[in-house]
Amino acid sequence: MKYFKYIDKFNVKVKQPTKESFVEKIMLRILPSIIPRANPDFDRLYDKVITWYIEYDDINNVTNREIGVNKDGIVIVKGPFGKNLGFWTDEDLTIEQYDTDFKIEYVEQDEFEKLWLTEGQTPCK
């Protein structure tokens, strides 16, 4: 296993909330009843993740687990966790792609596990 983290450069800048159109509001209410969400508890929180911690299986080349931390250093998302499959665990990225796209920094397993066991402010405990 490899453990690493990276800063989500897209979420570092505070985004201005956007207004949804009438049609978008209707679709956002109807679609979840037709198509189940992969991360029902966390979908609304992904934009607030600043740092991602990843547990990567370098033998099978898959992301096993993920932790999202907000600007205050608080764990706000985990995956897979409860009904939530995860954001990165659902992607087929190699460790090389993570490093090329996100400039990863390796961390110790203990650091990852400590965060994983932290309840933080995740909606499901």
Image (cartoon, helix red, strand yellow):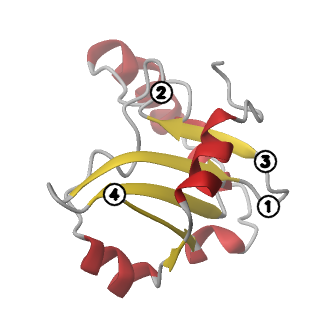
| Residue 5 image offset from top left, x and y in percent | 54, 68
Say few, some or many: other residues with alpha carbon within 10 Å of mark 4 (under 14 / 14 to 19 / 20 or more).
few
Cα–Cα gap, marks 1 and 3: 7 Å
Query: Would you say the residues marked 1 and 3 are in contact, meaning their CB atoms lie under 8 Å apart?
Result: no
- Residue located 76% across and 68% down the image: 14
Q: Which residue is mark 1?
A: 71
Picture coordinates of residue 28, whole percent (x, y): 46, 29
- The answer to whether residue 2 is above or below residue 62 is below
Q: Name the amino acid, label 2.
A: Phe
Give percent across and percent down for residue 82: 47, 19
Q: In this view of the protein, can residue 30 be seen by the observer?
A: yes
Mark nearer the N terminus (4 vs 3): 4
Label 4 residue SS: loop
Marks counted in the figure total 4
Q: Quadrant of residue 9?
A: bottom right
Of the numbered discs in the image, which one, if any, rests on residue 16?
none
Q: Nearer the viewer, mark 4 or mark 2?
A: 4
The disc labelled 4 sits on which kind of residue? Met
**Can you tell which of label 4 and label 3 is closer to the viewer?**
4
Q: Residues within 10 Å of mark 2 (few under 14, many from 20)?
A: some
Label 1 and label 4: CA atoms lie apart by 27 Å
Q: Earlier in the sequence, mark 1 or mark 2?
A: 1
Label 3: which residue?
A: 74
Numbered disc in front, either 1 or 3: 3
| Residue on which disc 2 sits | 81
Secondary structure under badge 1?
Answer: loop
- Residue 1's disc number: 4
Circles 1, 2 touching at the beta carbon (< 8 Å) = no
